[in-house]
Image: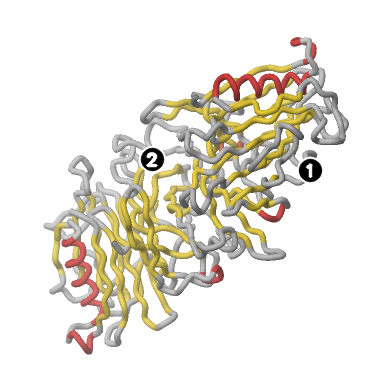
Amino acid sequence: MSFQYQNFTISGSRDEIEGTSEFVTKAKEFMESAGWVIEDDRRTQAGSATDADTHKIVMKSEGEDDSLSTFYLTIASGVSSVQNSNVVSFMMSTGYDVGTHDVPSSDAKIPANLGGSDFLNTRTSQDYEIWMSGDSEGVVFITRQSPATYASCYIGRCNQFTSIALDPHPLYIVAGNTTLVTKSTSAKVIAGNPPEAAAAVSEGESIGISYTAADQPYTGVHTSVNSIFVATPLVITMDDAAPSIRKGMVGTVRNAWQAAGTTSDMLAEGTLTASGSFGVQIYRAFPVSTVSSLIIRQS
Amino acid sequence: MSFAYREVVVSGTRDGVEGTSQCINEITDVMVNQMGWVLEDDRRAQAGSSNETLTHKVVFKSNLGESNDQPNWYMTITSGTGSAQRNNFLSFKIHSAYDVGTHDTAATGVETPSTISTLTLPTDSDGNFVLWISGDKDGIALVTNSRSVYGHALVGRSQHFVDNSIEPFGLYINTSTDVNPATLSCRSIAGEPPQAFQNVSEGEILSYPFSTTHEPRMGLGSPEAFFTAMPLMHMTDDASPSIRKGAIGLISGAWSCAPTGAGWVKETVITVSGSPDREYVAFPTTTNGLVIRKS
């Protein structure tokens, strides 16, 4: 399929569906439009402490290229037994058994359980805004619960540095449940052959160049063109040290980049235009007060 | 012309020419006869002088760059600094114009650094030292190793993020007595009309912060010992007397890689498979290591 982008506001009051469950439904519709396939629809379930029984959807990716390995993304409403609890939880796995509604023990998954550290804040009954951007290999979800309170998560299959023989499943989850996350020392990663899961914090990273307000944006150099910002790829790496060393660069994140922060005068939620050999694309910036900020593709 | 690479041992003893002058001879040969730069002013017959227009030096013109449609710019390399010819180092300067009649930067041009002694690359007058030369008409990377002491110079035109009407030059120049290409003290010529960024606080070369915890690939099935080299970002960040800042582009022909502690073999050759196959030479340090193209 192809790239998709959506921005909308949902609320239990407006849509008569509890807000977090509505996020799950909207994510299913968005991902299907981007080429994902619904593998297991468990939205009629109540919340449960058991991953196999809880309120969730499981989406299957066959990638933008037919030669790529299939992988699965689970999106659950709430955490463990608490359905509709103002968060959605994420899990990625190299396999999924729709009969048992669970990840087979032979497959790698990140994190180890739904409701670990990889979740995104939502709202149950009040309005909140959502951005979804991505394709059939990688998606970005951003929520805004109040004018200055964001949460974000980028999930997918890396633009990998090695061949698919070495990394058949170069997967990542990077979540900032109350922040707009860019660089992170707590990325969850699946890499290697056979696939290895770095499912705990400290076992993976999302790395970016450090910009400062001193070097962004392009100002005062040209007499008529100012306010040009630069955005660069985020690199996913595994850096697990114990009980045995598992490390190495995996690839770059899809559909999300790192740019300068608000201190460099980026507009909050501004749109940026990029032109190049790919044509003209529009990106949406979500600046924060630190030195780095998240950029997602809009068109 | 095209990309060229040379690795050579230089010594006054072996070549019958003082080492620092011979280093200039080697660089001149590669840049002019293999890369395609124009030798705009050959002043190698001069003795050393504290007057830059009179001293022992060569001045190269970029000859329209690799795309053959770029504005020409100039690079001066002198033996020693000031009056001290053959002083165990080379000195560098870049400028947007040059007057071969006066042997000086033309009045319409800008230059950096302001004095030729600011940016230096260690050499050796009479002992053996190794010189690596890599690059093309858009930029060169030089590395020296004299008695286990490394130095490097990166001089070139950034691979721009913006078009030529905004950045006709976008030049960078930096030298260091190590092989860490990342720096907070890069000099530049950038903008339109071109402006010189003369001081150490006015430019940066930024890198991805890889560490020994990330590199090399290990424990994820075979093969292992893969390393990753990433592009270097050329930035300007001048704050005073007026703000002049922004990302200019990527460094041409040089990359950064993991530090020595990650298990690099010093001065190892690494192979990159792609289209076409290429070889690179890595020079690791305790922080970011320099990678230059070999073939």
Who's the residue at 44% across and 43% down the image? A249
Residue reaching furthest to the front = B101
The image position of residue B34, as x and y in percent, is 55, 21
The image position of residue B127, as x and y in percent, is 79, 18
Local secondary structure at mark 1: loop
Circle 1 marks a residue in which chain? Answer: B
Mark 1 vs mark 2: give the one in front.
1
From the image, tell me which residue sits under label 1.
B115
Gap between marks 1 and 2 measured at Cα: 43 Å
Circle 2 marks a residue in which chain? Answer: A
- Asked if badge 1 and badge 2 are on a common chain, one would say no
- The front one of A73 and A212 is A212
Q: Which mark is residue A161?
A: 2
Q: Residue flagged by tag 1: what amino acid is it?
A: Thr
Q: Is residue A263 above or below residue A157?
A: below
Q: Is residue A212 visible?
A: yes
Q: Residue flagged by tag 2: what amino acid is it?
A: Phe
The image position of residue A128, as x and y in percent, is 31, 81
Q: Is residue B261 visible?
A: no
Who's the residue at 58% across and 27% down the image? B37
Who's the residue at 36% across and 29% down the image? B275
For residue A275, what is the image quadrant? Answer: bottom left
The image position of residue A42, as x and y in percent, is 15, 68
- How crowded is the residue under tag 1: few (<14 C-alpha within 10 Å), some, or many (20+)? some
